[in-house]
Amino acid sequence: MLAIALALGASLCWGSGDFLGGLTTRRASLWAVIVGSQAVGLVGATLVVVLAGHGWPGLHAVWPVLLGGFASVVAISCFYKALAIGSMSIVAPISATNAMIPFLVGIATGERPSAAQLAGVALAAAGVLLVASERARAGDTIGVAALPNEPAVVPAAVRAAGTTMHVTRRSQRKAIILSLTAAVAMGLVLVGYDATARYDALWAMLGGRISSVTVFAVVFLVLRPRLEMRRSALPFVVAVGLLDTSANGLFALATTQGYLSIVAVLGSVYPVVTVLLAYGLLRERIAPHQMVGAVGTLAGIALIAAG
């Protein structure tokens, strides 16, 4: 039960962070949100590890999550590019399948969830896919939840001239390939967290942040994008960084308390949180199939907990 609570806590933090990240991009450039939230997350994770008195566990323990930081950049880059050239209704659900990678790894390494839990996994996964699937449209704030650790973005297909952008078959095929790449890469990130958490869950949280900050710093120095931020955006940037880092830590802890195959699926329901927050706080439209997906996800979670 503790593993379920921790994994759901990670989803709550990831989903809330994506929601706030989407709002913050109205007051600051995307790169300003990324740089600020990554820096805040690194400071927060470092303080937690130092105050907890956890010493360096060794490179043999941390290297999986360090590599995960590189994989996360691949995932995020592919995800954003796919959103820019493809239909959101196809890109988002494909990217949301990232939990299948750690699920399969868990099963392959000997984990055996109960029949009820497997049914719950299938129901929750289907629910997330329904929630993540929506018609590209203009005028909404969030658009689609991002992958874990990054703020949500408004896809170019939604921004284009205030209307739905026509997507060619060639672009759609490329977007599908990019979406699958993003899903696999993010799934490997979650596997990396699990591998390092077996030695030290807090260092899994810190190691992942160190890696992502390093990669983003290199990319930033190469691209040298312009940073723009209103003063009012600063509290939101800090909140995004703290929520993302907290989610990483909760997920890492969850993998030490239960099956990776179960924890990964529960940790992937964050798009439901983002969509419901956008609906409840911003009164954004939510399609009937998305509401069905949200209910299905909750039912799946209940089955997993009961199993």
Image: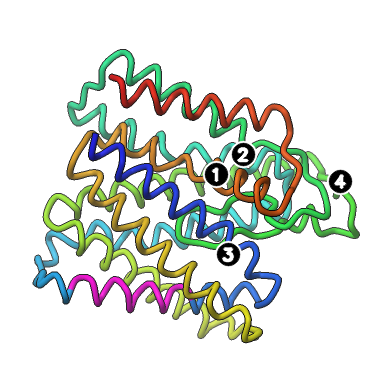
Marks 4/1: CA–CA distance: 25 Å
CB atoms of marks 2 and 4 within 8 Å: no
Question: Are discs 1 and 2 less than 8 Å apart at CB?
Answer: yes
Disc 3 residue type (three-letter): Gly
List the residue tagged with mark 3.
21
Disc nearer the start of the sequence (2/4): 2
Report the side of 291 relative to 100 (left or right): right
Relative to 162, residue 285 above or below: above
Along the line of sight, the residue nearer the viewer: 109 or 227 = 227
Q: Residue 107 in the image: x percent, y percent?
A: 26, 27
What's the amino acid at mark 2? Ala
Quadrant occupied by the N terminus: top left
Query: Helix, strand or loop at disc 3?
Result: helix
Q: In the rendered structure, which amino acid carries the disc numbered 4? A: His
Magenta-drawn segment = 37-49
Task: Tell me, for residue 271, which label it has, or none.
Answer: 1
Q: Quadrant of the C terminus?
A: top left
Q: Position of residue 77 (x, y in %)?
A: 55, 60
Disc 2: which residue: 132
Q: Which of marks 1 and 2 is nearer the N terminus?
A: 2
Q: Which residue is drawn at 30% across and 20% down?
A: 306
For label 2, the SS is helix
Q: Mark 1: which amino acid?
A: Pro
Mark closer to the observer (4, 1): 1
112 is within the stretch colored magenta: no
- What whole-number distance in Å separates the C-alpha atoms at marks 1 and 2? 6 Å
Disc 4 packing (10 Å; few <14; some 14–19; many ≥20) = few
Asked where in the image residue 113 lies, by quadrant, the reply is top left
- Mark 4 = which residue? 166
